Amino acid sequence: MNDDLITTRAAAALLGVGTTSIKRWADDGTLVCVRTAGGHRRFRRGEVLRLLNSSEEGPGSESKADIHERLPSMTTGQLDTLDFGVVQLGDDGLVLQYNAFEEEFAHLRRQDVAGLNFFTHVAPCTNNKLLYGRFREGVARGLFDFTMDYTFTYKMQPRVVSLHVFRHSGTNTNWLLVRPR
């Protein structure tokens, strides 16, 4: 049934975004919610599915494919308008670009991280086989594209995120996208 009520977490899973985005969309009226007696948000499955069909990423944003294709040609100002973290990395793991969302999320200024190795100096909690190892293997092969849930623990409270790490095939540039969960 398309009008059954689902939780915030279920809506987030259907749309492929974090629960924070779902709550924000409910608060700004983009996604209509019903409140339970306990004050919890519930969403009509049909409404969530309509939103999913209208945009792969949610309201007011481009599809993932569109964003990924445009990243290499976006200016710093354009990267700063995105509502998720963007880090461009050299093949050696050095930070080439770092957008405003990521500055605020990580509490690290872009001028302080530019030219540093992301995996060993900026976010040493990522210096492991799971992330840095896969990045290095992908650079060696010249191709990688993976998504994973990850918990950042460096210089902050643990923060659960969804990471998308990929190499743009047209420009051979490397990107790490950070979406809080």
Image (cartoon, grey):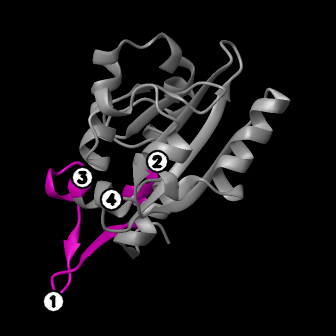
Q: Secondary structure at mark 2?
A: helix
- Find disc 2 in the rendering and name its residue: 52
Tell me which segment is drawn in magenta. 24-50
Whether 7 is drawn above or below 38: the answer is: above
| Quadrant where the C terminus is found in the figure | bottom left
Q: Secondary structure at mark 3?
A: helix
Q: Amino acid at mark 3?
A: Trp
If you read the primary sequence from the N terminus, does the residue marked by circle 4 or circle 1 appear first?
1
In the rendered image, which residue does mark 1 sit on?
Answer: 37
Residue 168 position, x and y percent, is 65, 23
Q: Nearer the viewer, mark 3 or mark 2?
A: 3
Q: Which residue is mark 3?
A: 25
Q: Earlier in the sequence, mark 3 or mark 1?
A: 3
Residue type beneath disc 4: Lys
Kind of residue sitting beneath label 2: Leu
> Does residue 42 show up magenta in the picture?
yes
Q: Are marks 3 and 1 in contact (CB under 8 Å)?
A: no
What separation in Å lies between label 3 and label 2 (alpha carbons)?
13 Å
Point out the frontmost of discs 3 and 4: 4
Indicate the secondary structure of the residue bearing disc 4: loop
Task: Quickly name the residue at label 4.
Answer: 155
Residue 72 is a magenta residue:
no
Q: Horizontal placement of 5 versus 161: left or right?
A: left
Quote the CA–CA distance across marks 3 and 1. Answer: 21 Å
